[in-house]
Image: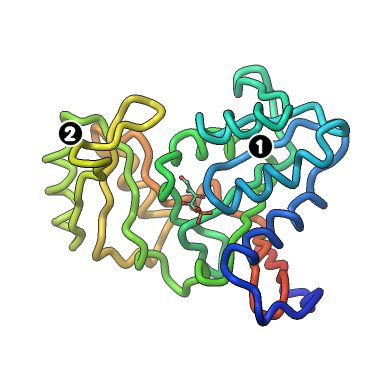
Amino acid sequence: MTQPPSQSTSALSQDELKNLVGQAALSYVAPGEIVGVGTGSTVNKFIDALASMKHLIKGAVSSSEASTLRLKALGIPVFDANEVRELSVYIDGADEIDGHGNMIKGGGAALTREKIVAALANQFICIADESKLVDTLGRYPLPVEIIPMAAQRITQQFAALGGRAQVRLKGDQPLVTDNGQILLDVSGLLITDPLAFETQVSQWPGVVTVGVFAFQRAQICLLGTAQGVKTLTF
Ligand code: 5RP
């Protein structure tokens, strides 16, 4: 369902749209609760906004070292995921989101912890600017966190599906995730059945996490558009 835009934003930059959705997400944070917090430039706007109500919440469960640092710097307590039975909301960005709330995530290399924290939450609220909304997932190279010794075999498995996998680099070395593993970015895929795709790739030996979020899809997307923040519900 799309709600009427709240204000005209025709002159706003992508950064300002991220700011708008980061602010809008505050209305999903209930006083007294622990909130699940994702990773990325859009979530950074949400974390900054969350600081304004830090005295009303218990704290956050974070999906990355980067978000943890930002939360703590703003005085927001960070809980270990194992200390929390469930969360009412998890708020995170996406690299792509389709019309059913399925997403590609992991552009910020945090997909494994993002999926873990999302699984603890009753509701996934995606915050994104409208460039992220797609008909079919796959234009954005799919991030996959893997065990390094499986890289060659997994690359071959993606090639059999028509995908071209490349190890993500930081400088001239493989990027190492918060979990001490590496990432493949896979281009050339058209993911028409996200749930089936996530199920299939998750079973390949050496795959830690595939960046398709269909089991942990979004229930709500706050989409920053030229017409304002649109609320998509799935
Ligand atoms: C990090 C992610 C991010 O949510 C995704 O990359 C979107 O980031 P941004 O808000 O910076 O566009 O999945 O692993």
Residue 114 appears left or right of 31: left
Tell me the SS state at disc 1.
Answer: strand
Residue 234 appears left or right of 208: right
Q: Residue at x 64, y 66 (%)?
A: 17
Q: Identify the residue position indicated by label 1 in the image.
A: 36
For the residue pair 231 and 49, the one nearer the viewer reads as 49
| Quadrant of residue 175 within the rendered picture | top left
- Could you say which disc has been placed on residue 134 in the image? none
Q: Pinpoint residue 73: horizontal percent, then vertical percent.
A: 65, 29
| Quadrant of residue 29 within the rendered picture | top right
Q: Is residue 105 above or below residue 131?
A: above
Tell me the SS state at disc 2.
Answer: helix
Q: Which dot, 1 or 2, sits closer to the camera?
A: 1
Q: Residue at x 75, y 55 (%)?
A: 23
Q: Pinpoint residue 174: horizontal percent, then vertical percent.
A: 22, 37
Residue 122 appears left or right of 55: left
| Quarter of the rendering occupied by the N terminus | bottom right
Q: Specify the amino acid type for callout 2.
A: Ala
| Quadrant of residue 146 within the rendered picture | top left
Q: Residue at x 24, y 33 (%)?
A: 205
Colouring style: rainbow
Q: Residues within 10 Å of mark 2 (few under 14, many from 20)?
A: few
For the residue pair 98 and 7, the one nearer the viewer reads as 7
First of labels 1, 2 by sequence position: 1
Q: Identify the residue position indicated by label 2 in the image.
A: 150
Q: Is residue 38 above or below residue 139?
A: above
Q: Is residue 30 above or below residue 135?
A: above
